[in-house]
Image: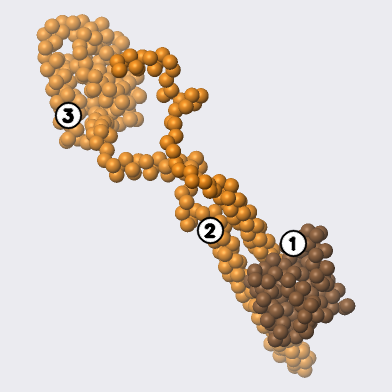
Amino acid sequence: MSMSQEEIEALMSGLDIQEDESPAPEVQEQESESEPAIEEDNTSMSEDDITELIAQTDVPSEEPQEDSTDDTVSSENIDELINSIEEESSETQADENENIDDILASINGMDETTPETPAAAVTQEANAEVPTESIQSEPEKEAIAKDWTDGQIDQGVFPFPVEKNTKVVNQLSEVATDREEKASKIFDVLSFILDENNEIQKSSKQMDEFLAKQIVLLDSLSKKFPNISSFKSNLELAQSLQAVPQDIINKTNAENSQLFEAMELMQFHDINRQKIERVMSVIKKLSTYLNNLFEDETDYHDVATAKHIHGDVNSNLVDEQDLDALIAEFGN
Amino acid sequence: MKILIVDDSSTMRRIIGNVVMQLGFSKDDFDEAEDGVKAWKILGESQYDIILTDWNMPNMNGLELVQKVRSSGNHQKVPIIMITTEGGKGEVITALKAGVNNYIVKPFSAEILKEKLDGVLKK
């Protein structure tokens, strides 16, 4: 019932001190998943002990240190622990069985009150899974089948179902049409930039002409009135800006040539469309051909077909011995 | 000078139009048609100095249009340049036999079209 300090230390260190006890398998499994160090805690632990241990397992950074120190302590005191257990074994055996029941009861109680506990969570999951599998309704089965089918489609094992969006020729036709629309929009953008560049060039030419006139004017003014410094300074400024409009014109010219190149490259939209149309044509012809090839003009009706035929690679096939055994078993 | 551009792809018509404009023509210098039937209708309404046509088009293709232009109407002597993706030798021969003056395989550059235009207009 009550644990000595040594026992607690032994439990903390993960020693197996219950050789002669009958551990509860469920509790062992759950705890071993959550924390191997407290695997043997199911001897005579009180609820406080369990809470304390769980609290300690919540701090993972401390675990290795505790494990290492407890391991050394337990190896030193192992004989002492065994002796103490042997002494108490006769007295505590009955109590321990009760304690196990208490622990189980307390753990079950913890499932409801402390869902954060890892062991409790595992129990809950296990409890939750079993009934859902056993009572699957038809919609659930259909959902599972759909999930599986979707998975196979995603993996490329199954083809897409025959729908409007997945029909090959439909899709190709949409691509061809969409391509034409988008190409037209791209062309609009390129044309817009081209037109804007032309406007910029026009303005630049006007600016250039204006600057040339200003230079002539300022030049004559600065010559007539050499004492007025503003004429001279403005003349210098106008002369320095004279190259700017021409620079803008040159840059827009270079940009325009790039745009024309881009427009030329857009011919590939048309070339690719024709390639797509060629593929569509082949598919249509192939479809017609296969339909004609497999078309049945006789009065053929579906017949029942064998599921297992000799030569199939199938474990359900019976040999002579199986057949005799089955006949004998039914005694017909 | 008036130019008629015939192509089922609006993108191609615009590309050819831009190339033509690069050569110094304005937007008023050319008209567009999206197939042979519409081109034939336009040819009946106005006079053109050159026809630039695609081959593969719905309703009436370029080859049929060339044969029709050469056989009837008021554009029998007008130069025709075929601009198409059909790059086979057999196709080129067929087009030339039908009455095409020159032949351009897509994709083409502005320089190529300029050369071909200059070539047919000089004659």
Q: As shown in the figure, which amino acid type bears the numbered disc 1?
A: Glu
**Residue at (23, 23) in percent of width and height:** A27
Colour used to depict chain A in the structure image: orange
**Chain under disc 1:** B
Residue at mark 2: A170
Residue A108 shows which numbered tag?
Answer: 3
**Residue at (32, 19) in percent of width and height:** A69
Residue at mark 1: B86
> Compared to A204, does A15 lie above or below?
above
Q: As shown in the figure, which amino acid type bears the numbered disc 2?
A: Asn
Residues A289 and B32: in front is A289
Residue A168 location in percent, x, y?
Answer: 54, 54
Q: Label 3's element?
A: helix
**Residue at (80, 70) in percent of width and height:** B98
Residues B83 and A29: in front is B83
Q: Residue A192 appears in which quarter of the rendering?
A: bottom right
Which quadrant of the figure contains the C terminus of chain A? top left
Q: As shown in the figure, which amino acid type bears the numbered disc 3?
A: Asn
Callouts 1 and 3 close, C-beta under 8 Å: no
